[in-house]
DNA sequence: CCATTTATGGACCGACCGGTCCTTTTTTGA
DNA sequence: TCAAAAAAGGACCGGTCGGTCCATAAATGG
């Protein structure tokens, strides 16, 4: 599904699947899974119901595609930033700083994965497997950074790398919840000293 | 609404409003607002649709009552525990420890307020005002504890009490998200050393 | 015993839900 | 030019949504 057969035999798609998926993702992000209806999706994606179902299968499948896309985007960003960062420690500091300082203008608040996990739970048959997959992927990147810190000797004694990864993960989740709760960036930035203290 | 007129003139209620509200709260907690239907509410609350609407007004109103009840219960528990704790610092440590170690047997995961904020957002006309009210109440208790620490001289130098309250708040929200994401209590307990380091 | 008051069960409402299906349109390769 | 292929529009589906209404049941005070 969502195949882009540019040289297909029949009538070509009259919408851009990537852009449609992006719009669907933004809508789920803002409104949640249950709070988003197929007609709303049709409207923002700019296609009819039959096209939607032909291209994406079902609301569940579309939602999972959105979760996967979101997770892949953020994980990709994190991996790239980590690879280019001058040190794993600085990467973690920058990551938390960016999370705390973020403020969306007219975009959705919080994190689609956090929101979805809270709405549906990770045991939900609808999205549970995807949520766990993306949770583990995000966690793995933080573990990668923390282990690299340990190997570089940047990690203070007595800190288990994987435990530190869990701590950073918790902090970022908390910050994303606070964003959804309308805390200001200024209030959220109070949390930066927690990770600074954690890593030094 | 939900008045308990024990000496009313007419036919007495055939259900316990407190218990019905508790059951509704548990259902919203487990399934979210949009994921819970009126018929499910009728079933777990043990009353008919007309009784439900007569007693509670609407699904929105019932949900707000549940949020308020949940917030009042947790805030009351926190206030009492703080008042009786041998030190504000120990209260905060115990609070985070309990949050990290909690594991529900057959009860809902996570926090109703966190889940609802993530699902609906704090700007939602449905629940936004109540979510903000309860957010501020919970935060106020943590600020109270942090300020008491500062007055007792328990707070290390360079820590602003309200900033520390925000940090503890973020950590607890993160832990509640992780609970909803099926992290184990063992993984969540990794975060304890963060608050220990923060307060000493 | 009766009028009043209140709660209850259940029928009923229009709207919308997610999803299917069929017809029409637009493209391709032969 | 024409048959095959694929997408789009939109009617249509049963089910369920949140919510209302009314007749009935059960309690009260007089």
Image: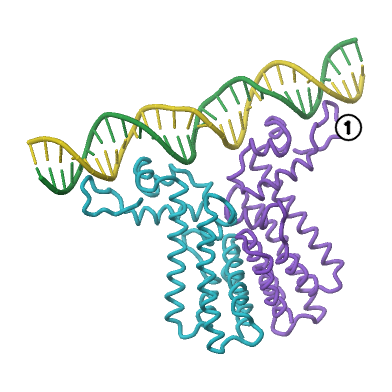
Chain colours: A purple, B cyan, C yellow, D green
Please identify the residue farthest to the bottom as the structure is shown: B153
Q: Quadrant of the N terminus of chain A?
A: top right
Tell me the residue at 36%/53% (across/down).
Answer: B20
Tell me the residue at 69%/36% (across/down).
Answer: A43
Residues A166 and B169: in front is B169
Residue B137 spot, x, y in % from top left:
50, 67
Chain that bears disc 1: A
Residue A195 spot, x, y in % from top left:
70, 75
Res A61 → quadrant: top right
Q: Quadrant of the C terminus of chain A?
A: bottom right
Above-or-below relation of D27 to A55: below
Tell me the residue at 57%/53% (across/down).
Answer: A119
Residue A122 spot, x, y in % from top left:
60, 56
Residue A185 spot, x, y in % from top left:
69, 65
Q: Is residue C30 left or right of residue A10?
A: right
Q: How many numbered discs sit on the rendered protein? A: 1
Residues B5 and A154: in front is B5
Tell me the residue at 80%/58% (across/down).
Answer: A76
Q: Is residue B185 left or right of residue A186?
A: left
Q: Residues within 10 Å of mark 1 (few under 14, many from 20)?
A: few
Residues B90 and D21: in front is D21
Res B166 → quadrant: bottom right
Q: Which residue does the numbered mark 1 point to in the structure image?
A: A7
- Under circle 1, the secondary element is loop
Q: Is residue A116 left or right of residue C27?
A: left
């Amino acid at each position: 599904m969502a195949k882009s057969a540019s040289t297909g035999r029949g009538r070509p798609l009259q919408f851009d699947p990537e852009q449609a998926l992006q719009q669907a993702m933004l809508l789920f992000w803002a409104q949640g899974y249950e709070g988003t209806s197929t007609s709303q999706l049709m409207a923002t994606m700019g296609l009819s119901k039959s096209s939607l179902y032909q291209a994406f299968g079902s609301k569940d499948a579309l939602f999972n595609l959105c979760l996967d896309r979101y997770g892949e985007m953020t994980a990709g960003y994190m991996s790239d930033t980590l690879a280019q960062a001058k040190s794993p420690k600085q990467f973690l500091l920058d990551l938390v700083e960016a999370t705390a300082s973020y403020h969306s203008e007219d975009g959705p608040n919080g994190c689609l994965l956090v929101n979805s996990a809270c709405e549906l739970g990770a045991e939900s048959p609808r999205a549970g497997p995807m949520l766990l997959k993306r949770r583990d992927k995000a966690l793995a990147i933080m573990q990668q950074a923390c282990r690299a810190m340990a190997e570089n000797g940047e990690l203070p004694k007595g800190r288990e790398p994987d435990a530190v990864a869990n701590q950073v993960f918790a902090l970022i989740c908390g910050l994303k919840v606070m964003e959804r709760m309308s805390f200001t960036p200024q209030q959220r930035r109070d949390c930066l000293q927690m990770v600074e203290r954690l890593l030094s």
